Amino acid sequence: MSELLKFHFTPADKARPEEENLHAQVSTDVTDVIKALQEQFPGAVTDVSVYAGEHTVFVARENLLQVCTALKETLGFTYLVDLAGVDRFQEDAPRYEVYYCFVNLKAGKRLRIKVRVEEDDAVVPSITGLFKAADWNERECFDMLGIRFKGHPDLRRMYMPEDFEYYPQRKEFPLLGIPGSLPLPPRTPEGELTLDPFAAARSGSPVKSYQEPAANDEK
């Protein structure tokens, strides 16, 4: 009988706000930017979290376009680095988050903004009118999580077929996919469509891939 692998739990570090954080970076110290947003848009910033000296600003969905406009046109954050969605899958809070990473190239500052989205109303304003780079990022987020971006000029699936019924990055989507949901080309020239690409993992019998005959078999 083989020995079970030992699993070591790593205790979580307690918060130590009185100590200097050696991982903090000057580029992520944006307290002045957060203060400016709070003063210009009262109530728009719903929460601010800090980890390793890096700020994350939570913005109300209805104020997202106002905040992004101010970041670009007033506060110098003209570069959208990334945009994506997160499935938090928690019962006590909105299920989804959409995060935006901006950079002020002149000041060398970074800022992350998050918008929380309810599962039964997964719609967020599109920022493609401000940042053209958001186009494909919003499409990918829609394709993988089903979050819709209101005002996007061409919101359609990016990787999956248009008639695909599921969203692969949602937590309830199986890691091995759903058999029959996405038929793949046959593995042999005369074979049928492959309805389950991971048949072996489900105790099935996968079809052998087509093999060219050996040279001596052609005689």
Image: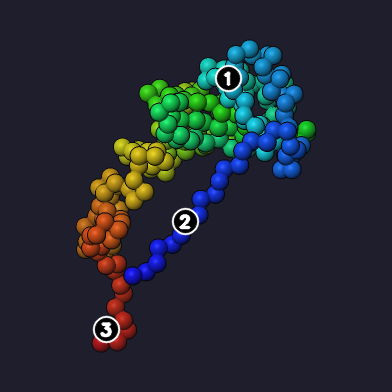
Asked whether the beta carbons under mark 3 and mark 1 sit within 8 Å of each other, the answer is: no
Q: Secondary structure at mark 1?
A: strand
The residues tagged by marks 3 and 2 sit, at their Cα atoms, a distance apart of 55 Å
- The residue that disc 2 covers is 7
Residue type, numbered disc 3: Glu
On the image, the x and y values in percent for residue 155 come to 44, 31
Q: In which quadrant of the rendered image does the N terminus lie?
A: bottom left
Q: Is residue 209 left or right of residue 21?
A: left
Residue type, numbered disc 2: Phe
Return the disc, 3 or 1, that comes first in the chain's sequence: 1
16 or 215, nearer to the observer: 16
- Which residue does the image show at 62% across and 29% down from the upper left? 49
The residues tagged by marks 3 and 1 sit, at their Cα atoms, a distance apart of 73 Å
Q: Is residue 213 left or right of residue 88?
A: left
Q: Is residue 204 above or below residue 40?
A: below
What numbered label is drawn on residue 118?
none
- The residue that disc 3 covers is 218
Q: Is residue 211 left or right of residue 191?
A: right
Residue type, numbered disc 1: Thr
Q: Is residue 50 above or below residue 43?
A: below
